[in-house]
Amino acid sequence: MTITKLFNRSTLAAGAIALISSLCFGKVAIAETKMFELNDWSILGSGNYTDNYLSLSSNSPDVSDTKMENVLGLSSGTLDDISGVNATAGALAYTTIEAKTGDIINFNWFFKTKDYLPYDDFSFWSISNTATLLADVSMVGNKGSIYNSESYEIVADGTYTLGFGILDGKDTAVDSFLKIKNVTQTKYVPTQTKSVPEPTSMLGLLAVGAMGASSLLKRDREQQG
Ligand SMILES: [Ca+2]
Ligand SMILES: [Ca+2]
């Protein structure tokens, strides 16, 4: 291949890239993540906000499982059902959020217990009138602990009560603890967009580019032959 041909091909390639740039740049939604301030959440029972954590304990003063179910809009008996034990009393932290379909709620949590089976103390979280077990004594073992994270996708626009709780099981003695931090809500905002290549257009232009390259090679061979 001569220098001239090489130069011409470089020019052609640059032109093709410019064409791609002008023709096939589309738009995509941008994700916005909001970190919740935890210091203004409502707390019932024994709990507080310190060092960017919500810290809850099943220690007294405590509130009953029935009271928590009322605050969170859970049907009566939900906390006994999800724990598989007679939930008695503990602490609850909660707030109200506005959310849209597709929003993602994330948080980190830490459960620790001083208790032992069969006193199956447990922690849970709640949104959209539904409660989900995070951990209990039977999961972590007697006097055990666990650190984990949770992710949840909102399935309908609305106003939600978001809550985290810790409860004693079977009796109200011997404490367990729940810490919550990094509670975030990620939104996908279609109106705020940035330009990115659309995959389908890029594939089409790559195919055209490949055809152009093969015809150049063919011409080379014809000239050489
Ligand atoms: Ca109960
Ligand atoms: Ca206990």
Image: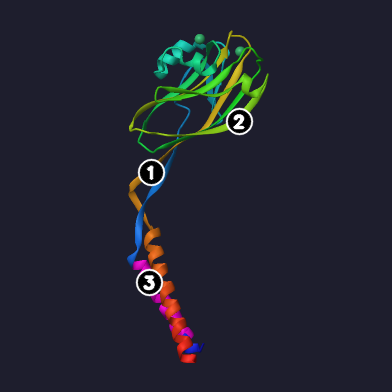
Which numbered marker is on residue 147?
2
| Residue 77 in the figure: left or right of residue 19 | right
Residue at horizontal 40%, vertical 22%? 129
Label 2 CB sits under 8 Å from any ligand 2 atom:
no
Circle 1 residues within 10 Å: few <14, some 14–19, many ≥20 = some
Q: Can you say whether 205 is above or below 81 in the image? A: below
Q: Earlier in the sequence, mark 2 or mark 1?
A: 2
Label 3 and label 1: CA atoms lie apart by 30 Å
Query: Which residue is denoted by mark 3 in the rendering?
Result: 18
For marks 2 and 1, give the CA distance. Answer: 28 Å
Which residue type does callout 1 highlight?
Tyr
In x, y percent, where is residue 170?
A: 58, 9
Ligand 2 appears in which quadrant?
top right
Q: How dense is the environment of label 2, judged by Cα within 10 Å: few (below 14), some, or many (20 and up)?
A: some
Q: Which residues are magenta?
A: 6-22
Q: Is residue 209 left or right of residue 157?
A: right
The answer to which of marks 3 and 1 sits earlier in the sequence is: 3
Residue 69 lies in the magenta-colored region: no
Residue 38, disc: none
Q: Which residue is mark 1?
A: 188
Amino acid on which disc 2 is placed: Tyr
Q: Tag 2, which secondary structure?
A: strand
User: CB of mark 3 within 8 Å of CB of mark 1?
Assistant: no
Where disc 3 sits, the SS reads helix
Residue 17 forms part of the magenta stretch = yes
